[in-house]
Amino acid sequence: MNFELTIIIPVYNEEGNLERVHDEMNIFLKIAKKKTKILFVNDGSKDNSQSLIEKISTNNEEFTYISFEKNCGLSAAVKAGFDYADTPWVGYIDADLQTAPEDFNILIDLTPEYDLVTGVRSNRKDSFIKNMSSTIANGIRRAFTDDGMDDTGCPLKIIRTDMAKKIPMFNGLHRFLPAMILLQNGKIKQTPVRHFPRVAGESKFNLWNRLLGPLQDCFAYLWMKKKYINYRVAKQG
């Protein structure tokens, strides 16, 4: 089947959400503006997530998976998704479904002009502390990267796969995807998307990895920006 878009869904102990993920993604697949398939990346879950993923993937040809030997973190799961994607475009959404799969169509509409399109969560349904720490972290990151993005933590993105595969990932770099596309002279865009409360499972982030972690990552990004190699071949014989 000629798929155009692979949507990566990182999974870590999300057994309470996976049935709903299956249902919601099936709804989106019917209306997607690009022919889409789903790639679960099981990040070493210790609950029943893997069994549910295998059941879903066995019964649906649009659903596939890879499973890590152990928990490696969100950035590793996103990188693995990029590595395994074989479609022109690759997307990403969290298994908690605090963003709506249908809103991928909003991002898809912008792909003719941009290499990365990311959502900006409107009217966020998170706690005050979570929202405030996210706002501060985004402000710090934006000051370092000058990427103009207001909400790089939004778990709804679509990227040209060839550019995604060139991103030299490290832990925490999932917050810097727009900036890494800019390093490749790509064009990026943000657009409002809906946001919903988490209905099952637990957030994997806390105050430490929302504030201090991203601050450390900013210095890693600055080093990478200084050393980054970017070239285009003019001729080949």
Image (cartoon, grey):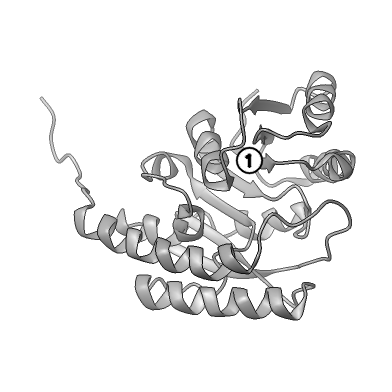
Q: Is residue 43 visible?
A: yes
Residue name at image x 87 percent, y 53 percent: 200
Residue name at image x 53 percent, y 74 percent: 137
63, 176: nearer the viewer = 176
| Amino acid type at image mark 1 | Ile
208, 4: nearer the viewer = 208
Horizontal relation, residue 56 to residue 143: left or right: right
Q: Quadrant of the N terminus?
A: top right
Residue name at image x 74 percent, y 28 percent: 63
Horizontal relation, residue 54 to residue 170: left or right: right
Residue name at image x 79 percent, y 22 percent: 54
The vertical placement of 59 against 78, above or below, is above
The residue singled out by tag 1 in the image is 8
Question: In the structure shown, which secondary structural element does the residue marked by tag 1 occupy?
Answer: strand
195, 209: nearer the viewer = 209
Residue farthest along the left direction in this orientation: 237
Where residue 61 sits: x, y (%)?
A: 76, 22
Few, some or many residues within 10 Å of mark 1 (<14, 14–19, 20+): many
Where residue 124 sits: x, y (%)?
A: 74, 74
The vertical placement of 67 against 181, above or below, is above
Where residue 173 sits: x, y (%)?
A: 45, 54
Specify the quadrant of the image occupied by residue 62.
top right
Where residue 100 sits: x, y (%)?
A: 77, 57
Q: Quadrant of the C terminus?
A: top left
Horizontal relation, residue 209 to residue 180: left or right: right
The vertical placement of 210 against 85, above or below, is below
Q: Is residue 86 visible?
A: no
Horizontal relation, residue 228 to residue 193: left or right: left
